[in-house]
Every structure is written in C-alpha cells, then in structure tokens.
Amino acid sequence: MRVIKNKNVCVIGGAGFLGSHLVDHLIDDRDCNVLVLDNLITGLKKHIHSKAKFQWFDIRDDENQLAKIFKENNIDYVFNYAAEPYIPECFERPMHFFDINATSVLRVLNACQQSDIKGLLQVSSAEIYGDLKGKITEEDLVVPHSTYGVSKVAADGLVQVRWREGGVPAIAMRQFNCVGERETHPYVIPEIISQLNNSNEINLGNNSFRDFQYSKDAVEMAVELLEKGEFGEVYNMGSEDGIQIYDLANLIGELMGHENVKINVDQARVRPWEIWHLQSDNTKLYGAIGKKTPTSLRKALEKTIEYYRNNNSTWDW
C-alpha cells in the first residue's frame, strides 16, 4: 500500500473549491510538502494554505514544462482537480471544455510518465452517467448529456488506457456533487443561500435529485483512494444519499431561520437537457478504502451557511 504522508505532492487546481480543501488536509493532517499549480481563473489565491508553495500554471501549457516542474520539486504524487466545470457554458465553448477536461489530462498523464510519478488521482465527474435511476455503479452505462460529460468520459478512458499502454500509475475518481466552505457562485447551494439570506422567496429551475458530499470528507477519501485504489480503475465518490433540489432549498431555509420557503419556478433557470437523478453507489470505493461514515447533509449545510455569514454574507465569484 502506498502511504501519502511526509511526501512531496502537487495539487493541480489547488486554489479551487475542492482543491484548496485537499491542500489543507495534506499539509495539516499528513505533513506533506505541497505544490499548488493553478491559473487562478476560477481558483482564488487567498484559499491556498500559507505553507503551500504556489506556482502559476495552465494545464493547457506544454507537458514537458509540467514534467520539468514535477522533477524540480521532486514530486511523488499528483492530484488533478483542474477543470472547466460550469456545465451551462460548455454548449457555447465545446472545444474549450474538451481541451481542458480531456486533452489536458493526456498532457498531465504524459508529464507524470516522464517524471516517474508514483501516483496520479484524476478527478472525473458523475455527469458522465447521464440520467439513471437509483444508485449508480461504475458498471452502469455512461450516456453523457453534454460536452462536459463527454470530455470527462474521454479523460477516464485516457487514465485506463495510459495505465495499460504505458504504465502510468493513475486512478480516475468520479466525483458526485459536493457541499462546503469556499464553493462559489453560480452553483446551486451558494445560489440558494444567497437568495434566502434576506428573503424566504427563491427562484429555482429544475427539481432534480442530487447526491451532495461534504467537501472535507471528499478530499480525505480521495487521498485514501490514491493510497489504496488500483491503478487504471475508476471509482465513484459521493455520499450515497440524495435530495431533490426543492427539498434542499427548504432545508437550507429552515437552517437559515425561515419558517416557510416560497419556491418560484424561473423558466430562465430550467435546463431542457437536465440530468434528473445522480446518486452514488460507493461499494467499489469502500471495497478499496473501507466503509466511511459521511458527514450528514444537514451538518455540512450548517458549516457552509456559517462560512457564508462569516464571509460578510457574500460568495466569491
């Protein structure tokens, strides 16, 4: 078993929502030396741990330059959280999304191979599955609804093929939705909290069903997965629980002190290509890292609301 403790670790996208929580965990709980690579387009430098080393980098840049960075910093393990994640925009910029989410993953894999990296965790997405009922396993058919989903399918395939073809030690982790501190607009939970800050009335679109995992649980389990998972494999990562978005709004309203929440359906927010149900089955994941007790959605939301209020009731964009 690989042990990621007192190691040199690179987190690509380490200034973002999940990436910055991962950096905190690696430094505070695992005594690692962490290099953060980020282009700061969506990530924020203020979220990077004070003990981390930061270097500006765009994963669309030359893979040889990335390999050089890995070698110069004696990197042992790499976590790639860099992505273009806001799905509505992929319809307007499909080439851009595919380049960052798929082609750039191949660049990262090649750089890892050149640098003799001991392990790479490539972060994928549950969006690859499309619209399925019940809990979703890794054996379920993938039917993505967007260029974003297709790009993540391609990245997963590259992880599998480059392990078989070139021995690149990588794992793909299909992350379901997350909730937690530092998430930014325009995602659903920050949007709901913002709208309910001064009113009990809210405008929403689709009443889809989503699996929300607390961000700190997700990154801690991600490290364990890179330690204990099998290279060339894909693993789901979620809470295994789920909730309808309108019920989520009512729960957030309750936690923010509203007796009743009035939900208006805003047609401008309705997505005709929506995936209506996403819920993880973690059986394969837990077979690798052991069964975990997740933070409840209520507790995760309480922490997120507290963060929002401590941040002057504003979200970073």
Image: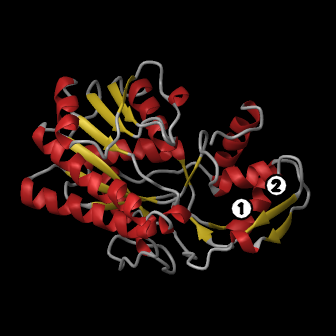
User: From the viewer's perspective, is residue 133 above or below residue 230?
Assistant: below
Q: Is residue 306 visible?
A: yes
Point out which mark residue 248 bears.
Answer: 1
| SS type, badge 1 | helix
- Left or right position of 142 against 275: left
Identified at 35% across, 40% down, the residue is 58
Instruction: Please say if the residues under marks 2 and 1 sit with CB atoms less than 8 Å apart.
Output: no
The image quarter in which residue 315 lies: top right
The image quarter in which residue 313 lies: top right
Residue 122's spot in the image, x, y percent?
31, 51
| SS type, badge 2 | helix
Kind of residue indicated by mark 1: Leu
Crowd around label 1: few <14 · some 14–19 · many ≥20 (10 Å):
many
Residue 191's spot in the image, x, y percent?
71, 53
Position of the N terminus, as image quadrant, is top left
User: From the viewer's perspective, is residue 72 above or below residue 197?
Assistant: above
Identified at 12% across, 44% down, the residue is 113
Measured in 3D between alpha carbons, the distance from the residue under mark 2 to the one under mark 1, in whole angstroms, is 8 Å
Number of numbered discs overlaid on the protein picture: 2
Q: Nearer the viewer, residue 26 or 313?
A: 313
Residue 117's spot in the image, x, y percent?
17, 38
The answer to which of marks 2 and 1 sits earlier in the sequence is 1
Identified at 21% across, 31% down, the residue is 70
Point out which mark residue 253 bears.
Answer: 2
Point out which mark residue 118 bears.
Answer: none
Q: Nearer the viewer, residue 296 or 233?
A: 233
Q: Nearer the viewer, residue 60 or 116?
A: 60
Kind of residue indicated by mark 2: Gly
Identified at 33% across, 60% down, the residue is 235
User: From the viewer's perspective, is residue 27 above or below residue 87?
Assistant: above
